[in-house]
Amino acid sequence: MSWRVANACAERKFGSATRKQIIMFLADKASDDGSGIWCSKGTIQRHTELGETTVKRTIRDFLKEGILVETGARGCKNGFTVVYRIDLAQIEALELTAEPDIETGATVDPVQTGPGTGATVAGVPGPLWPPNHPKTIHKPPSREREAAEDEEAEKILAAYPTDRLRGKAECLNRIREALDAGTKVEALLQAVQAYGTESKGFTRSKVCFSDNWFKSGRWRSYVEDIAKSRETAKAKEAEMLVGLANWVTDKHPLCRHITPGQIDALLAAELVTQAQIQAAGLRS
């Protein structure tokens, strides 16, 4: 990933939203010099959600215009994938998206075009450019953050039945994609554990190897089922608390069976008051 190449492409015009979307995806895969872009047209199509024909035509156009350059090929399960390089010189020759600065004469209360240099609230000057300024170069994720993400993916994969593990690199990439899309770590981990429990004792003809399981998205149904079960449990708990609150307000003899934890839950949910708890002969 190169933020330099991504920022260079972001501030140039490419002629259409489709072309801009594809070049930004490729820039996200490039090194700082624009090289090392290794992703198939099918990958581009899946991530950008554009048509396959559109992706192929746009790549051909970029090659003709010199924006992209083929630098080699790398083997993959379907044969080989072309390696591209974004020609930064061609990118810099394109029209800028930002409007040119227009110099005007002095005004009564001129607007400052640059960053402020006066005192700040804490006495510490702000950054040279605001975060959304075109010249701002965003920092890539820290090594600590990348290490944490890798550790989470490894933890999830480690929960998969060991006799069906296959294609570790492919599995970890699919797991990271799921997490990047917003799936919670704990939810995906529970989905893997649920599949392991459900398929325990299956014959080899019925099991699913890990690379296919993550690639086909079979974990999604487990995540959805877990979320539904959680919501059902919350609804039952809320219903139970309402029943306990009725016991308390009615000073029902069964109040003596209410546990301290349930009393805390009733108070937290504001279903009863401290006075009602005491009137029912209970202690919070």
Image: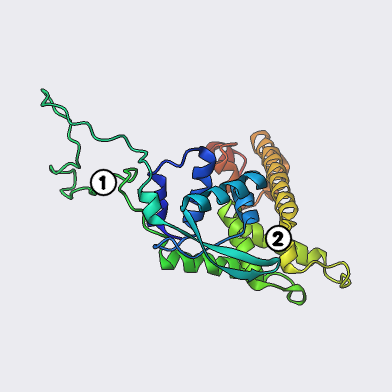
Other-residue count near label 1 (Cα within 10 Å), few / some / many at <14 / 14–19 / ≥20: some
Q: Position of residue 120 (x, y in %)?
A: 17, 44
Q: Position of residue 264 (x, y in %)?
A: 57, 48
Furthest residue toward bottom: 163
The image quarter containing residue 203 is bottom right
From the viewer's perspective, is 264 left or right of 245?
Answer: left
Which mark is first along the chain, 1 or 2?
1
Disc 1, SS: loop
From the viewer's perspective, is 137 left or right of 270?
Answer: left
The image quarter containing residue 142 is bottom left
Furthest residue toward top: 108
Relative to residue 172, is residue 163 depicted above or below? below
Relative to residue 59, is residue 75 depicted above or below? below
Q: Position of residue 252 (x, y in %)?
A: 71, 39
Could you tell me the amino acid type at mark 2? Lys
- Visible residue check, residue 245: yes
Read off the residue under disc 1.
129
- Visible residue check, residue 283: no
At 66% across and 69% down in the image, what residue appears? 76
Could you tell me the amino acid type at mark 1? Trp
Furthest residue toward front: 64
Other-residue count near label 2 (Cα within 10 Å), few / some / many at <14 / 14–19 / ≥20: some
Disc 2, SS: helix
- Which is nearer the eye, 253 or 3? 3
At 22% across and 31% down in the image, what residue appears? 102
Relative to residue 204, is residue 13 depicted above or below? above
Read off the residue under disc 2.
215
